[in-house]
Image (tube, coloured by chain):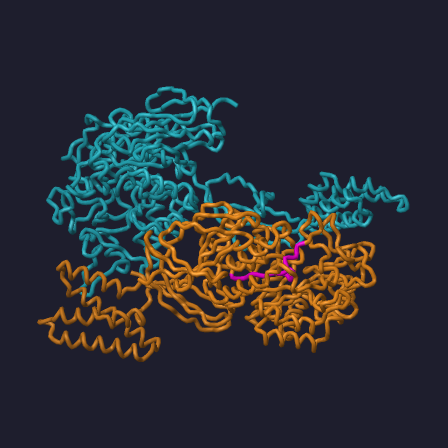
Chain colours: A cyan, B orange
C-alpha cells in the first residue's frame, strides 16, 4: 500500500505545507488544498510505501483466513518501534512520540508472560484506528519519492474572471464635438455606466499624441490643423507613456477620476500600447531601442504593403535589452502607483512572448491583483501561448462567431478543453477596430442578441460605447466604423431612440444576481430543434443557481423552436415539473416534461434567460 | 518570418545533426529525420528569426505595391554583408563564404555608378533562389531559441514490432510423460514450429528447481517424489539464475538448441523471473537481499491470504541496493552471452519501476537488439508505465476481450491513442496461466477465431503449446488448465484430430506475405451490421497492401452480415469495382459498390481475410 500527499506553498514562502491524498479510482489519487491568497502558489506530490498500512491490511486478511498470527504481531510491533525511534530522532511533535510510546507500553504489558501470549489483546492495540492515524502521520516514509516538477497555480481576484467592461474615448465625453473631452467629463459619465451595471471603464491611450505624420479623420494620411490624431500614436515632446495628454487634464484630474470611479464601484483600465509616435522622447533618449535605416531615418511600423507612418515600433533585443524591458515594466508600475490595476494590452502578439512572461510576473510579484487583458487577434496557438505565459484575460474570436455551429464549437473549446485552465475569454461585442457585419445588418435585435450571448456565454464581457445606441455605420464594405473616434472627437446622443440601455442594464443585473454567470467552465449546450436557436445552461457547482438561456440567432425572423430541457442534468425524470422565471421579462412559468416549445421574436424577445427551480427532493 | 530545424543525434554521439523544418499549417511545423540504427536517438528543436527571408518577403510585396525600393535594397545588401562577416568569423564552409562574397561583388559592380543606380539588377541578385538558399543555410540565426527538452526515440529492430511467438515447456518435449524432456528434444520440435511459421520460441525458466515446499501436480502443497515442481521456483544447491536444470541438458546442449533454432529462422526467448526458491544460492550468499522474519525464518511470497510457499521474493532497496540490481542485470547479460536476445519478464509490475528503467537501458546500451516482453497483467496505468520506461513489448488484456464492443474499444485505445507511441501489444491467445473461458466453451471454431484476431489485429501474437490442438480442459470453474504443465511433465499428441495446425500455418504465412500486418497502428474498424461480426482493415502507408478482415465472434452460430466496404478510405466512389482474394481459402471475388453481404459459418469459415486490389487509376 502506498500513501501520498500534496506539498504546497506560496511561491515566496520557504516552508511547504502538506495535504493528504487518497485513492480516487484506478491509480488516480486526489488531494484537496485551499488556496486563500491572491498570489502564486507552487505544488508537487510526494508518495511512499506505507509499511504499517500494508502490514495492517495483510494482517486482517490472514486473521480472517485463520492463519498463524504470532509472527505477524511481532512484525507489526517492530514497525511501531521503528516509528517511535525515528520520531524521537527527528524530534517530531512530542505528542506523537509520547503516543507511540504509550502504544508500545500497552503491548509490553500484554506480553509480560510469553507462555500465555494474548494475541487478541495485541491485535486490538495494533489495529486500533488511533494507531493507524498516528502511524500514517508519524510513521516512516519508506521509499519516499517526489514528483520532479513544481507546478504553479496563480490565484487571481474575482475581477480576473467576472466583470463587465465599458470602453470609451475620454476626449469624446464633452458632449460637444468641437470641445476636447476631459477626465472631469468622464467623471460626469460614471453614473450612466454604473446604472448600466459596468464594472470596468477602459480608456484607449491617454498620453500625448505625436504630430509627425499624424492621421486625419477616417485614417487619412494627412491631418487637418484641428485633427486630434490617433491616441495610439503615443508620445510628443510633452512626454510619453507616463505623461498625460494635456487636453484631458493633469494628474490631479486623473486621480479625481480614479477616485470617483472607485466610489461608483468601477475600476479604471488603461491601454498598454508599446508603439511610439516618431515624436516620443524615447527616440532621442534611447535610439538603441529603435530600428534605424541605412539613410539615418527611422523605420515606421508596417505590415507590407501596409504602412503606419504615425508610429514606430521599438525592438526588444540587441542593445534594447534589458533597457526597454525595465522601462516598460516601470510604465506599468507607474500607473499602478496612480491607482490603476487593470491593463488592456495592445497587440501583445507582435512583441516577444518572453517579455510578457517576465513583465507580468515581475509586476504581479509586487501587485498580485494587477490584471492584464491580451488584445491579440491572431492565430490560435499564439493566443493560447500568451494566456499561458501570464495574461489574465484574452480577447477572443467571439466577435466573428455568429451561427449556432460556430458558437457551439468555439465555446466548447473555450469552456471544455484544457484551454479553460489558462485562457479566460473576455467577450467584446464590438471595439473601435471591429464593427461586425452582423451588427451592421441586423438592426436593434442584433445588438440585443450579441449582448446577451456575450454576457451569458462568458463571465467576462465588454462593449465599446455606441453599442448601447445601436451604432454600426461602417465605412462601406469594411468592419471599420465611419468617422471613427480613433481619429476624431465625437459627440454622442446618449438617449438616441431605439437604444438598448434598458436591456443592458437588466443583463448586467441578471449577471450580478446569478453566480452561475460568474464562471464560464460551467457552460453546457442543449438541444433546440432549430439551427437558428442556441440553447444552453449554466449552473453553480452546488446547483443552487441554475440558468437556461435561449437565443434566436436570426435577428430577422421569428423562430418557434422545440427544446429538450436538460432534466437529466438535474437528476430529474421525464415527468418532472419545473418552475422557472424568465429574467429579462420577469415572467414566471411552469414546465411539465422535457419537450417544450418557445417562440423567440427578434422584435420582442430574441433572448430568454430562465432561472430554473427544480422540484424539492 | 521564422525558420526552424530538428537537431538530432545518436545518444552516444557528441555532435548534433540537423534537418530543416517547414511550416505545415497553423503554427505546426514538420521536419523529417531518418533514424537508421538500432539504438537510442535524441532530438530537439531550434528556431530563429530569419531576417533575410523576412526582408525578401516584404521586399516582394513592396515592389508589387510600387513603393520606393532603394533603401530596401540597401538593407537587403546589409544582411548579406553581415552573413558574410559571420561566416568568415566562424569559419563556415569555405564554399558558402566564397558564394556570399561573390553575390556581394556582383552587387558592388551593379552599384559602381551611384547616379544611375540599377535597382532592377540589384533586386535580381538579392532575390535569386540561390542566395535565398545560401542565406537560409549560412545566414545568422537571430534570436536563436532551443526547445528546453531533449526528446528520446528508441529505434528497435523489426522483431520488436512483428513476430509470432510459440511457448513450450521443454521438459514436456520427450513425447513420454515419464521421461524428462531435454534441449535436444526441443531441437527435434523445431521443424514443427518452423512449418507453422513461428519466429520466436519462448521457454519458461530452465534453471534448477528448488526442493523446499516444492509444488505437486495441480498446484498441490505437497509434491510427490517424482513431481518435477514448478520451474518458477528457481534455484537449488546446483545453482540459480545462471545455471541450467540438469535434466534439460548442459550448456553444450543449450548452445546446440540456440544454434539449431537460428538455422530454422527461430529466436530463443527466455523467461526472466526474479523470485527464488528457498534453496536458491542467493539466500546464503546475499541474505541482505531477502526479508527475514523476527524468528529468523524467511518470508515466503504471498498475496494475503494466498501464500506461495515454494518461492521467496528479493527486495530492491536498503542493503540490496545496488547489489541485486547489478546481479540481475548480469543475469540478463549472461544469457545474452549465451546467444539469447529476447526476454519474457515475469510479473515486472511487482518490482520497482526504476529498476526496470535502469536495467533495460543498461542492457540496451550494450545490446540495443535485446528485447524485453513485459508480462504484467495489472492496472492500466502500471502496464503503460512499464512500456514507457523501456519494455519493448507488453502482454495485454486481449485474452479477455471477446465481444465486438470490447475489442473495438480496446484496440482503438492501443492503436489510435498516444499509447501507440510506446506500448507494443503482443496478443497471446493463451498462456500456461490463462485458459480463457471463450476457448473452454467455444470448441475448435473459438480457437480459429482467437488465432485470427490475435494474428491480424496485432503485428505480434503468441500461443502456448496445446492451443493448436484445441486443448482447453480446465480445472472446473477456473481459468487454470487441468493437469497444468507448470507442475508436471506432459506428453502431447501433436497430430490430435481436429487440430488447427493447418490454419495457423496459413495465418502465419498470410502475416509474413502481407506487410500491412507487420504493424498495429494502421488498424481501422468498419461497419458490419451485426453485433457478432467484427470488420476491420489494415493497409500499408503506401497503400500497396490492403487487407480487410471479417471475424464471426460467435463460435456457435452462422452469421450473415451486411458490410460497408471502406471504399472512401481508398479514395473510391460508391460505384467502384473491387477485386479481392480471400487468403485463407484462396478464393477470388469481385465486389460492386460498398454494401456487401458475407456469410461466416464457424464450422467452415469463421474468419475471412481479403487482400484487396483497388481498380487502377
| A593, B333: nearer the viewer | A593
| A147, B476: nearer the viewer | B476
Left or right of residue A251, residue B278 in this image: right
Q: Position of residue B340 (x, y in %)?
A: 62, 72
Against B42, residue B534 (above or below) is above
Residue at left 26%, top 75%? Answer: B100
Q: Position of residue B448 (x, y in %)?
A: 56, 56
Residue at left 58%, top 46%? Answer: A26
Against B7, residue A612 (above or below) is above
Which quadrant of the view contains residue A506?
top left
| B10, B422: nearer the viewer | B422
What span is in magenta? Answer: B459-472
Left or right of residue B433, residue B82 in this image: left
Which quadrant of the view contains residue B239?
bottom right
Residue A353 appears in view: yes
Against B257, residue B150 (above or below) is above
Residue at left 22%, top 39%? Answer: A437
Against A313, residue B282 (above or below) is below
Q: Position of residue A586 (x, y in %)?
A: 35, 21
Amino acid at each position: 500500500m502506498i500513501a501520498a500527499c500534496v506539498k504546497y506553498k506560496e511561491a515566496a514562502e520557504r516552508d511547504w505545507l502538506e495535504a493528504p491524498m487518497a485513492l480516487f479510482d484506478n491509480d488516480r489519487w486526489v488531494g484537496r488544498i485551499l488556496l486563500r491568497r491572491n498570489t502564486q502558489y507552487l505544488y508537487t506530490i510526494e508518495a511512499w510505501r506505507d509499511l504499517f498500512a500494508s502490514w495492517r491490511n495483510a494482517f486482517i486478511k490472514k486473521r480472517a483466513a485463520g492463519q498463524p498470527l504470532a509472527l505477524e504481531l511481532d512484525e507489526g510491533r517492530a514497525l511501531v518501534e521503528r516509528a517511535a525511534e525515528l520520531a524521537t530522532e527527528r524530534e517530531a511533535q512530542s505528542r506523537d512520540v509520547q503516543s507511540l510510546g504509550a502504544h508500545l507500553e500497552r503491548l509490553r504489558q500484554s506480553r509480560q508472560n510469553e507462555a500465555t501470549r494474548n494475541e487478541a489483546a495485541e491485535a486490538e492495540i495494533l489495529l486500533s484506528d488511533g494507531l493507524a492515524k498516528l502511524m500514517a502521520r508519524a510513521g516512516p516514509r519508506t521509499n519516499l519519492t517526489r514528483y520532479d516538477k513544481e507546478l504553479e497555480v496563480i490565484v487571481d481576484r474575482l475581477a480576473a474572471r467576472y466583470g463587465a467592461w465599458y470602453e470609451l474615448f475620454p476626449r469624446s465625453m464633452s458632449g460637444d464635438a468641437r470641445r476636447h473631452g476631459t477626465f472631469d467629463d468622464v467623471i460626469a459619465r460614471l453614473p450612466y455606466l454604473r446604472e448600466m451595471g459596468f464594472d470596468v471603464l477602459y480608456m484607449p491611450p491617454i498620453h500625448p499624441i505625436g504630430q509627425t505624420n499624424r492621421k486625419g479623420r477616417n485614417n487619412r494620411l494627412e491631418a487637418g490643423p484641428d485633427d486630434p490624431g490617433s491616441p495610439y500614436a503615443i508620445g510628443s515632446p510633452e512626454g510619453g507613456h507616463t505623461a498625460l495628454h494635456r487636453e484631458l487634464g493633469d494628474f490631479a484630474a486623473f486621480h479625481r477620476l480614479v477616485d470617483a470611479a472607485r466610489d461608483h464601484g468601477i475600476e479604471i483600465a488603461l491601454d498598454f500600447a508599446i508603439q511610439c509616435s516618431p515624436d516620443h522622447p524615447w527616440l532621442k533618449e534611447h535610439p538603441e531601442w529603435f530600428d534605424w535605416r541605412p539613410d539615418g531615418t527611422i523605420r515606421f511600423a508596417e505590415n507590407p504593403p501596409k504602412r503606419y507612418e504615425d508610429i514606430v515600433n521599438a525592438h526588444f533585443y540587441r542593445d534594447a535589452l534589458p533597457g526597454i524591458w525595465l522601462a516598460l515594466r516601470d510604465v506599468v508600475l507607474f500607473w499602478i502607483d496612480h491607482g490603476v490595476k487593470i491593463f488592456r494590452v495592445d497587440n501583445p502578439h507582435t512583441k516577444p512572448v518572453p517579455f510578457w512572461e517576465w513583465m507580468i510576473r515581475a509586476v504581479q510579484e509586487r501587485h498580485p491583483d494587477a490584471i492584464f487583458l491580451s488584445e491579440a487577434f491572431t492565430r490560435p496557438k499564439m493566443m493560447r501561448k500568451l494566456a499561458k505565459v501570464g495574461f489574465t484575460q484574452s480577447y477572443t474570436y467571439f466577435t466573428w462567431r455568429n451561427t449556432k455551429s460556430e458558437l457551439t464549437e468555439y465555446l466548447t473549446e473555450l469552456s471544455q478543453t484544457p484551454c479553460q485552465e489558462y485562457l479566460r475569454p473576455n467577450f467584446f461585442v464590438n471595439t473601435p477596430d471591429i464593427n461586425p457585419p452582423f451588427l451592421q445588418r441586423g438592426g436593434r435585435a442584433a445588438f440585443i442578441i450579441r449582448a446577451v450571448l456575450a454576457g451569458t456565454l462568458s463571465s467576462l464581457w465588454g462593449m465599446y460605447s455606441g453599442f448601447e445606441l445601436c451604432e454600426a455605420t461602417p465605412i462601406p464594405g469594411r468592419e471599420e466604423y465611419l468617422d471613427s473616434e480613433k481619429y476624431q472627437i465625437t459627440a454622442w446622443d446618449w438617449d438616441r431612440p431605439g437604444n438598448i440601455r434598458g436591456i443592458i442594464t437588466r443583463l448586467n443585473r441578471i449577471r450580478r444576481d446569478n453566480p452561475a454567470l460568474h464562471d464560464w467552465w460551467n457552460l453546457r449546450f442543449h438541444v433546440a430543434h432549430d439551427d437558428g436557436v442556441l440553447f444552453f445552461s449554466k449552473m453553480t457547482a452546488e446547483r443552487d443557481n441554475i440558468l437556461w438561456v435561449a437565443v434566436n440567432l436570426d435577428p430577422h425572423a421569428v423562430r418557434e423552436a422545440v427544446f429538450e430541457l436538460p432534466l437529466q442534468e438535474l437528476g430529474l425524470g421525464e415527468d418532472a415539473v419545473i418552475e422557472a422565471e424568465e429574467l429579462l421579462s420577469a415572467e414566471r412559468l411552469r414546465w411539465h416534461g422535457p419537450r417544450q416549445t418557445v417562440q423567440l421574436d427578434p422584435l420582442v424577445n430574441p433572448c430568454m434567460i430562465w432561472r430554473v427551480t427544480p422540484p424539492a427532493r
